[in-house]
Amino acid sequence: MADLDPTSGEIRSARGPQNSQRILILGGTGEGTELALRLAHRPDLYTISSLAGRVSEPKRPEGIVRVGGFGGVDGLVSFLVKERIGMVVDVTHPFAVRISHNAELACARLGLSLIAFIRPPWTKTKADIWHEVKDFKEAASLVDFQKRRVLLSIGRQELNSFAACHNAWFLIRAIEEPNGPLPRFHQILLQRGPFDLSEELRLLENHSINYVVSKNSGGPATYTKIQAAQLLKIPVVMVKRPVKHTASTVETLEEVLMEVDRLIQFNRTTR
């Protein structure tokens, strides 16, 4: 049975059944975990889930899991060849642009099928007070004023965009302690979601938050903070999504599963 080298995160042995379709799931999201669970026990498939490894204790999906980067396009190509992958499913976060770009290039180089999933973004309602911005630096310049108390709930990777802020106070919520430069006035809150609406309302009220900065991640897992801001009439600085794929995409796991089955059937008939 395949397992992982605990030091490198690489798969020691992933031979699997000879006639199974070998699928790499680029995950790290709730949808990636759900997809791995739904595919793990199918006898016609052999799946490997890949996680970026940005937190020390990630939620591990069902089945074979590798953790860490591939080393760019060339490293991903080498992995796909070594593990005899026949299909890649990209179920990464909407803001995880680099791995999606690398997956497209690697699959094109090897002639492999790529299924690209993108969850639908949140849409503004009449009750929302949104300021939509193109990136995190624009978000930082918009909120850095005295007497602004800002919930910064964007993960650790983009916090450096707020390091030059010297006026606003930030409540920085993250799963693990940030290790880069931070704004002058801040408090760290280490929590792992999802959070229910009552928790988010209490958080915003207890800390007198008057601005929320969020990625437009989409999905239900972190939407309660947007709902709470709406109910309390707190403005949200919403960072728009970057362009993630040039390939066509699907928006539901049911579509992913249908495409997996279609490609398996196609591969069988063209052997």
Image: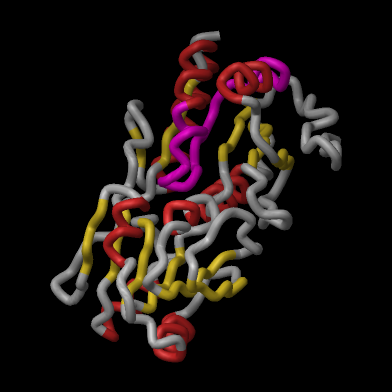
Report the front residue among 72 and 3: 72
Report the front residue among 236 and 270: 236
Q: Which residues are magenta?
A: 80-101
Residue 39, image quadrant: top right
Give the x, y percent position of residue 144: 33, 67
**Residue at 44% across, 37% down:** 97
Give the x, y percent position of residue 246: 33, 27
Report the front residue among 24 and 265: 24
Give the x, y percent position of residue 35: 55, 47
Residue 258 visible in the snapshot = no
Q: Is residue 117 above or below residue 108?
A: below
**Residue at 50% across, 26% down:** 103
* Quadrant (top left/top right/bottom left/bottom right) for the N terminus: top right
Residue 16 visible in the snapshot = yes
Q: Is residue 97 magenta?
A: yes
Give the x, y percent position of residue 54: 63, 49
Q: Is residue 93 magenta?
A: yes
* Quadrant (top left/top right/bottom left/bottom right) for the C terminus: top right
